[in-house]
Image (cartoon, helix red, strand yellow):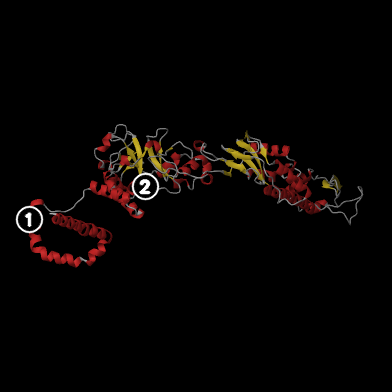
Amino acid sequence: MASGTLAFVLSSAGIVILGEIAPQSACAKYALAIGARTIWITKLMMIVTAPLSWPISKILDVILGKDIKTYNRERLVELLKITYEQESNLNLAADLRIAVGAIEIVKKNVKDVMTKIEHVFMLSEDDVLDNQMIEEIIDKGYSRIPVYEGIDRSKVKSFVMIRDFVLLDKKSNLTVKVISDFHRRKIRVVDENMPVTELLEEFKAGHYHMALVSGEASNSDNHSENSGKEINDNISIGEIKQENIPLINIEDKASDKRPKEFVGLITLEDIVEEILQSEIVDESDSILDNVQRNKRKVTKMQLNQLMTCESLGDPLSFNMRNIVTKWLHEHHEIFGRKYFEPRALENLIQKNIRQVMISSQRRQDQAPVMLYEYLMPSKRFILILEGKAKCLFPRSNMSFEIGPWTSFGDLLIEKAYECWKKGENVNSIQFKPDFELSATQPCRFLQIPISSLFHTLRISRFTRKMRRDTFTNNLEITISNDKDTVTSDTEIEPKKKLSGLDETRLRSISTNSFGQRVNSNPYTYTELPKRNSNHELGFVKTTPS
């Protein structure tokens, strides 16, 4: 009895270990290699057992049916999900995830993939395309932007592309309506229950890559009937086959097929992301996910690069320019007529107007634009003209809000004035502010770099020297020590000498330079500078022949 029991245990253990566990363990890791080397054994056994196994297999096929292992779509998706969740190979897991997305896309509708309408960035026809608006459009990062009429976001008429603003003159202040009416692009409208695969086929045709999603129930009856409908002459609802496009008007209230409500927007990128089971984020995207609305993390340095900071401003008006000139005359002697030519000072002001444009929608999130940094050497003078700036003193931790007609860098102007009078080198002039000056809202100011200041001073000095030399060379006269008599050897006839001069030029020389006009009588009195240290003006008498 004991021997029978021992024989049973040993035989069972041998079969389990040697016949099941060991072969399966070895074949699981080296299945292909073992199978390739033992294929002749398998074929030999098939030939030997064929007379018995083949008739039995046919009988079982008739009774039980063919034994073919198949998977439906749901079971295949679950199998792939389990496989890539347990797969340690990350590359294979990523491939399996894409396969799952491609299989599941066939049972998804547009409403499962679209971006909700409240999250869609749109433009009104009445929006003015100024610096601030174009800055906001670029910051959003969208290539196609729907355009709606008035203030009603449901009345979408067309869409514009970011490339439409490349050659746009920002100073012209055109409206969005002008751009959209010029291009008159058509936009597709689909029903929210439309299959994603059907819309993908339309996108693949290449006519459009964006569509508005309508929540109207009447549109869900037949999706194919909506292909190619046009709204307001600008909105096309599909156009795979142009010759079979039925048209409707979104503004036609009598139309039964007119969309009553837009619930979202869908693009080709949304469908591709759904297939890939991951978000596609490029360098211009500000939102990482159109469902969770997760914002992209951007460093301060990137924010300053993406957003408009300090830039060249528009020239001042005539009255504003005169006020600025007067302010400079009153506060700094170097800007007076003694050193500056009026025209040169005007050019210096107009070419150094700067501005900071900050969007009101993003003012809370945007980093301030630094005009002066604490203890950072600076070589420019700043005068606030419009808007406000914030001045912070880090040592005392006190901050002030600065308004128009507040200047910074006056010490730099004073140093420049002293160096100019002494004729010293000006390249090393700078100052270190003990404060921080930043613009947290739209601001306009005048900046005068020290290099531009001295360049303008040199131009003014050169212009005055040329004017004096020109007058001296063109007006040749004889100075007589005797007021009553002159000798023929030294005198020069003014009529003969002046006859070759243009009358207008003579008037300009005598009047503009020294304030005295040449008389028409034979004895002409012309105001000339005497050659003395005080540069006083005197009269010189000339006489005809």
* Residue appearing at x 7%, y 59% in the figure: 55
Q: Picture coordinates of residue 399 (x, y %)? A: 62, 35
Question: In this figure, which residue is indicated by the disc labeled 2?
Answer: 278
Q: Are marks 1 and 2 in contact (CB under 8 Å)?
A: no
Name the residue at 35% across, 38% down: 264
Residue 523 % position (x, y): 85, 46
Lower sequence index among marks 1 and 2 = 1
What is the secondary structure assignment of the residue under circle 1?
Answer: helix
Category of crowding for the residue at label 2, using alpha-carbon neighbours closer than 10 angstroms: few (below 14), some (14–19), many (at least 20) = some
Name which residue lies at 12% across and 66% down. Answer: 47
Q: Which mark is residue 59?
A: 1
Locate residue 408: give its quadrant. top right
Question: What is the quadrant of residue 180 in the picture?
Answer: top left
The kind of secondary structure element at disc 2 is loop
Query: Does 241 sit left or right of 365 as displayed?
Result: left
Q: Amino acid at mark 1?
A: Ile
